[in-house]
Amino acid sequence: MTVHPIIAALRKHKAGVVLIALQIALTLAIVCNAIFIIGQRIERVNQPTGMHEENDLFLITQQWVGAPSADDPAGLEKLDSMEQSDLAALRNLPDVASVASIRSLPLLRSGSVGGLGLKPLQQKSTINLNFYYGDEQALPTLGLQLIAGRAFTAADIQNKSFRDQSEPPLAIITKSIADKLFPQGDAVGKVIYFDSSSTPTTIVGVVARLQSPVDTVGSSLTWNSALFPVRQVANFSRTVVRAKPGRLEAAMRAVRPALYAVNPMRVIDEEHGVRSFADIRADAYRADLGMAILMSVVSLILLAITAAGIVGLTSFWVGQRQRQIGVRRALGARKIDILHYFQFENLLIAGIGAVVGILLAVGLNLWLITRFEMDRMPVIYVLIGVLAVLALGQAAVFVPARRASNVPPVTATRAA
């Protein structure tokens, strides 16, 4: 098959060629970036938090009614006693594996952030990080992987008012922090300082990972976390519970009766008082899932419109070329030759559109980087996009091309 007749035929239909090529170029540019965004969102939604068997976890948030203030020693002791009673009642539930007092959880959108230095009174922090507070049951309940050092013991735990900002003497940090501060792998036993303080804090353990309470994917804060052996006491509390495998629903249902039996003077919100971590994760990533679905729908619509455009234009050209098709058939062209003719013609148009689309896709990605701080799109997405639009063009042109190949030579000649 020679290219010259095809190019000569396309010159007679310049407007249609330009329109289809531009449509393919725009589709390629938008779809490549849309798929890249979808991939990023899916990767974000599926990334691990560092907690083991998340589907067995749930969070209890409640507030006592008429409780004393934690600002004085007597009130602090009373509130801590009330919280300890709650923890004991929850641990006695038959469907509960472990319970821990906690102040925040990954993806909860509620937490504290601060700075960390290697010297006392260091004004500029070496790194920024998330602060977690929990008791000696925090690590096993959350299911964090301890890779160095030790976990907290009951003797390590301090009872502090929620407003007490004094630095704890001990901390467990994530591997992300340990690798940045102590690349030799000797973080355990080292002394660090938080928020420009002169009070030293000794690292007693390192966990593999613990994600930020706020969705900060791409930020340095995402995996920079420290857990302190502190039970923060206030007139409200958060408790994380690990249910026995397969017993999450039963454990969650038993929480309210058990806690009200200990002390009815409390408020546990019906909707958010007892929440599974699966629901917390779903809420945190709701916007990401929505964006992924929206981009998928837009991509499918664009691809469908492009395919429809190719089908419509090719069908129009087939109708206009009845005589040329008949002449070719009369001169000995086989059905497969006519089919290949239109397929190759479409491949030329799609190839032109793909070249322009590559430039548009890269330009669109650069614009998104400057305006929305997106990552640079890997070349593989563009290559996949090119193959996709070329395959789409071949699939779309097949039906009208096959119809053209079935035109009888005699009928086409008589039509002239």
Image (cartoon, helix red, strand yellow):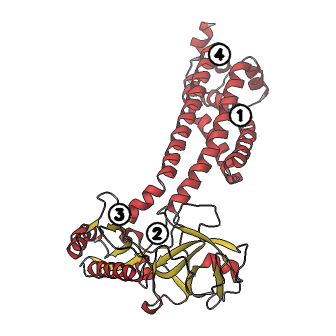
Q: Which mark is residue 105?
A: 2
Contact between marks 4 and 2 (CB within 8 A): the answer is no
Describe the element under mark 3 as helix, strand or loop: strand
Contact between marks 2 and 3 (CB within 8 A): the answer is no
The mark closer to the camera, 1 or 4, is: 1
Cα distance in 3D space between marks 4 and 2: 68 Å
Q: Which mark is residue 321?
A: 4
Describe the element under mark 2 as helix, strand or loop: loop
Three-letter code, disc 4: Arg
Q: x, y (%) of residue 238?
A: 39, 71
Q: Earlier in the sequence, mark 1 or mark 2?
A: 2
Q: Residue at x 51, y 42 (%)?
A: 294
Q: Earlier in the sequence, mark 2 or mark 3?
A: 2
Q: x, y (%) of residue 269?
A: 31, 60
Q: Earlier in the sequence, mark 4 or mark 2?
A: 2
Rate crowding at label 2 as few (under 14), some (14 to 19) or many (20 or more) other CA atoms within 10 Å: many
Cα distance in 3D space between marks 1 and 2: 49 Å
Cα distance in 3D space between marks 1 and 4: 24 Å
Three-letter code, disc 2: Leu
Three-letter code, disc 3: Arg
Q: Which mark is residue 275?
A: 3
